[in-house]
Amino acid sequence: MSTRRDFIKGMGLATAGLTLAPSEMLAAKKKKVQAAVEPKNEKVRIAYIGIGNRGQQNIDEFAKTNMVDVVALCDVDLQGKQCQKALNMYPDAKRYTDFRKLFEEYSDHFDAVAVSVPDHTHFFVCMAAMKHGKHVYCEKPLIRTFQEGEILIEMANRHPELATQVGNQGHSEANYFQFKAWQEAGIIKDVTKVVAHMNNDRRWHKYDWNMTKMPEGDPIPEGMDYDTWHGGIRYHNFSKLYHQGDWRSWYDFGMGALGDWGAHLLDTVHEFLDLGLPYEINMKYAKNHNEFFYPFSSTIEFRFGARGNMPPCDVIWYDGTDNQPPLPEGYGESKLADGIPASGQGEYTKLSLNPGKIIYGRDLTFKGASHGSTLEIIPKEKAEAMKDKLPQVPKSPSNHYVNFLRACKGEEKTRSPFQIAGVLCQVFCLGVIAQRLNTQLFFDPRTKKFTNNEFANAMLSGMPPRKGWEDFYKLD
């Protein structure tokens, strides 16, 4: 096992040629990439990368739009039962197990990709797509390390002709338009605290927190390209505890409950309150903290400075089945959002406190559920007094999938592009570092460095990429 000294030394080597300069210093000649945009009346030719489980759900949603021509299917486990529905839906689509070969051999045949692979390979697939001039729809969280966010955001800035969209679907639903309208009307203002919570057991594991090494030793499923499954991260011997959705709980593969559900709970708060990056991250609570997987329960406080005429704001995150936040007086019933997709861990189980958020403003307090759910003013007496003052909220002109496809054709702009969702996911990366180290961290949003922890700075980039994967970190 690597020591902290070895890790920091390795990261010094890894980041020597990967650290990004400020945008104005990156004004070198752009690589010319031609975005493939079909005429407005034509369908978008799309390749799906990751076609089982969540990938299949995305495939079904894109199919409902009647705006796509599916030309390729790519998955490291094409023989797996989770992939068979998509393969049967599109028997004539070209098939690949390695996304690199898909782009190298077949990129002239499609305009866009939808990426539904595990968190640790999002970055590599997105970079390959953008380097080949493809529009990208990518599941959340977009990234697994802070540095990956820096590179993808810069890549998107360099190629405005490419549509990018991160899959937090609520960003195209009622919550998005309501938050925007209420803020513009002065209903949501002077927010000083936001509490977000995810306390269902669907994203939790039952691993042994006293383990001293990563599990291994199970046979690799027949036909699975397990090496490509890793992308550029270091190789792990196969374990059934990494397979399907179970990878999410491990630091090396996933972003835990924060990265998974934070994107559905804090997306509008982060964008419309212009939070950016925090200056302090406090690990308030971590149950069964260990080196390998996320705590059984955790509480993380993010502190954001004043922005323009908006006051400083604290965001407090609660996860774990036994770790619920205090509720304000008059909170009322905890509602469950509509349309929460099933996962490999099963359907969502309704609880007394469902995933949601509480927004504390100077004059008003709001509560909301996850995804596209709208906010309510609490308590009921305040809501009743305000109902005649609330502005009309416009309806969404397109759901998240239609919005992306229209953007591919130049008809709309995506609502959750890498430049917006990427920064939110970087906040999650900072929170994950605090979870791993179980400590308080001070961060400078200007230099994008921690000021009190050298090891935490090394973790902004993560471990060096495997041999042969270094070019994914190059912008040209």
Image (cartoon, grey):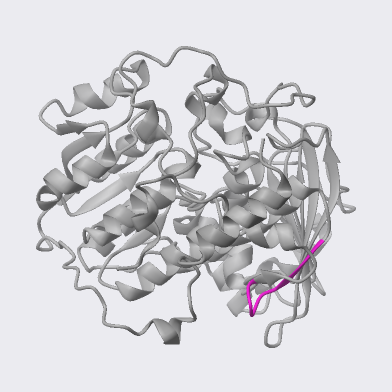
Using residue 392 as the reference point, say whether residue 295 is left or right of it. Answer: right
Name the residue rendered at 61%, 45% in the picture. 261
**Left or right: where 427 falls relative to 227:** right
User: Residue 249 in magenta?
Assistant: no
Q: Residue at x 68, y 34 (%)?
A: 293
Can residue 391 be seen here? The reply is no
- Left or right of 212 in this view: 411: left
Note whether 319 is above or below 454 in the view shown: above
Q: Is residue 446 magenta?
A: yes
The quadrant holding residue 58 is top left
Picture coordinates of residue 103 (x, y %)? 20, 47
Residue 126 screen position, x and y as percent: 35, 53
Report the front residue among 416 and 471: 471
Q: Quadrant of residue 457?
A: bottom right
Residue range in magenta is 441-448
**Quadrant of the rendering where the N terminus is positioned:** top right
Residue drawn at (83%, 53%) of the image:
439
Residue at horizontal 71 percent and vertical 87 percent from the top: 309
Quarter of the image with the C terminus is bottom left
Location of residue 475 in the rendering, given as x and y in whole percent from the top left corner: 35, 67
Q: Residue 376 appears in which quarter of the rendering?
A: bottom right
